[in-house]
Amino acid sequence: MTMLSLDWDHYRTFLAILQEGSQSGAARMLGLTQPTVSRHLDALEFAAGKPLFLRSYQGLLPTETALSMRSYAETMAASAAALARAASGDSASPEGTVRISVSEVVGIEVLPPILAQLQERYPRLAIELSLSDAVEDLLKQQADIAVRMVEPTQGALVSRKIGGIPIGVFAHRRYLDRHGWPGSLDELAGHRLIGFDRQLTYIREAIKSYPAMAGMRFDFRSDSNAAQLAMIRAAGGIGMCQVGLAAHDPDLVQLFPEEFDLHLMTFLVMHENLRMVPRCRAVFDALADGLLAYRGTAQGSNA
């Protein structure tokens, strides 16, 4: 038996063990019996000629060989998923599955009404929404369409520039009533601040324009923009969020709209091979229209 003689099921099991750290966890994840998972792992290790996992009280720990195999198995998984999405579609109408990669806060707060209207129009269209601030690789077909906050540089991608989505500094009226209204950005140091744990792209851009932000101490930190927004809505402090999202809640007050002017450049992207696929084209166009309308609403709120 060689690695080439094994089928996708074996490598799918391998990935599940990597993710879950145990055979029982992989079995639950895949809906398989534990003996089946054990047989798959035995076959993989026999073909590799060496152990792929070490047994420990923490579970199954991947060896260097297993770790070196991971990216290839993930590419196989992405290709298998893309193949399934391609097979689900029809060449003449927008039906089948489209996978969209988008940041968590946009996927939760902005896209649902756009997608709901789209699926009313095309009821045989299925949507997979991948919520992550990580940039999924469209060239490796990890997603069909992506909403990105950085301009794509790969030549094989088709992109539509949505433009700059305004970001503002906001607080709930309840917080301001309890703690007072800061008169300037410099006075934020005396307030409870909501912010980031890591410097994402738009944060680095904000610090370039407003260097004082680099030294700010945050009382609530999260890399989730959705969690930050929820904390602002809960009157937990002062933080940044998209102006268009805050516009839905009249109790969220924008502070220093003239002094703080930051825009998050946004792009809609897909692989050029998908531009003539009806289901992908329909989703791409609907997202473009919806995001442009959202941006226009946000700019209107910021005026």
Image (spheres, rainbow, N blue to C red):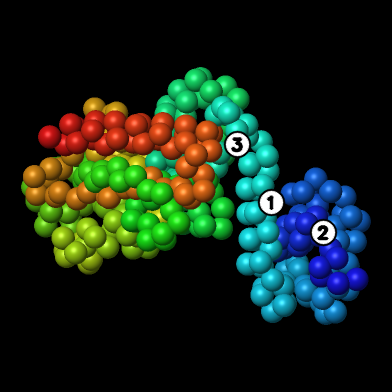
List x then y, in percent, for residue 200. 35, 60
- Dot 3 falls on a residue whose secondary structure is strand
Residue drawn 47% across and 25% down?
A: 118
Q: Which mark is residue 97?
A: 3
Q: Real-space Cα distance between discs 1 and 2?
A: 12 Å
Say which residue label 1 marks.
80
User: Looking at numbered disc 3 in the image, what kind of residue is underneath it?
Assistant: Thr
Residue drawn 73% across and 68% down?
A: 58
- Residue 204, above or below 101: below
Q: Real-space Cα distance between discs 2 and 3?
A: 24 Å
- Dot 2 falls on a residue whose secondary structure is loop
List x then y, in percent, for residue 135. 45, 56
Say which residue label 2 marks.
7
> In which quadrant is the N terminus drawn?
bottom right
Which tag, 3 or 1, sits closer to the chain's start?
1
- Residue 284, above or below 77: above
List x then y, in percent, for residue 15. 71, 60
- Dot 1 falls on a residue whose secondary structure is helix
**Residue lying furthest top in this view?**
120
Residue drawn 18% across and 31% down?
A: 300
